[in-house]
Amino acid sequence: MLVLRLSVGLIFTYHGSMKLFGAGGVEGFATVLVELGVKSPSINAWIVALTEFLGGLALMFGVYARWAALPLIFIMLVAILTVTGSNGFNIGNKGFEYNFILIAALSAIFLTRSEKWHIKQ
């Protein structure tokens, strides 16, 4: 579970940091949300960026990892419903395969109550 938390946490921390600090920042991400027809794009851009960044850190450090997984699952479900779902499953067709595997990994983290740095033996 440690490897899973570190891997998934890194993915979300990276994507959240790109939304917060990357080219365009949160305003650039809000522009994408406008194009998708999301209501209150500026507020939602901040919510998603901070949730991904802080949730990813929580997963990596095992601090409330179980509870950090829930809003991240929600974000991935919204991504499927607004962006990738209409393209089918296959990631090669810009489908929701990537979002699906992240939901599965986050669900495993939530269900196992994995919140420690060490590996239980």
Image (tube, grey):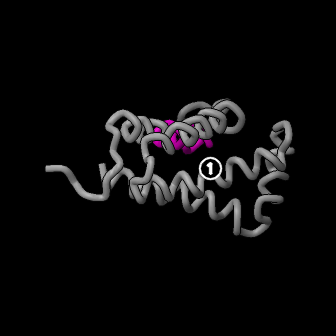
The question of residue 97 being in magenta is answered with yes
Q: Residue at position x 60%, y 33% from top?
A: 77
Q: Which range of residues does the magenta coloring cover?
A: 91-102
Residue 60: image quadrant is bottom left
Secondary element at tag 1:
helix
Is 59 placed left or right of 54 in the picture? left
Residue closer to the observer: 16 or 80: 16
Examine the rendered structure and indicate whether residue 106 appears above or below residue 30. above
The question of residue 53 being in magenta is answered with no
* Residue 74: image location, x then y, percent: 59, 35
* Residue 69: image location, x then y, percent: 49, 42
Examine the rendered structure and indicate whether residue 107 appears above or below residue 8. above
Residue labelled with disc 1: 51
Q: Residues within 10 Å of mark 1 (few under 14, many from 20)?
A: many
Q: Residue at position x 45%, y 47% from top?
A: 64
Is 40 placed left or right of 51 in the picture? right
Q: Residue at position x 70%, y 60% from top?
A: 19
Examine the rendered structure and indicate whether residue 16 appears above or below residue 108. below
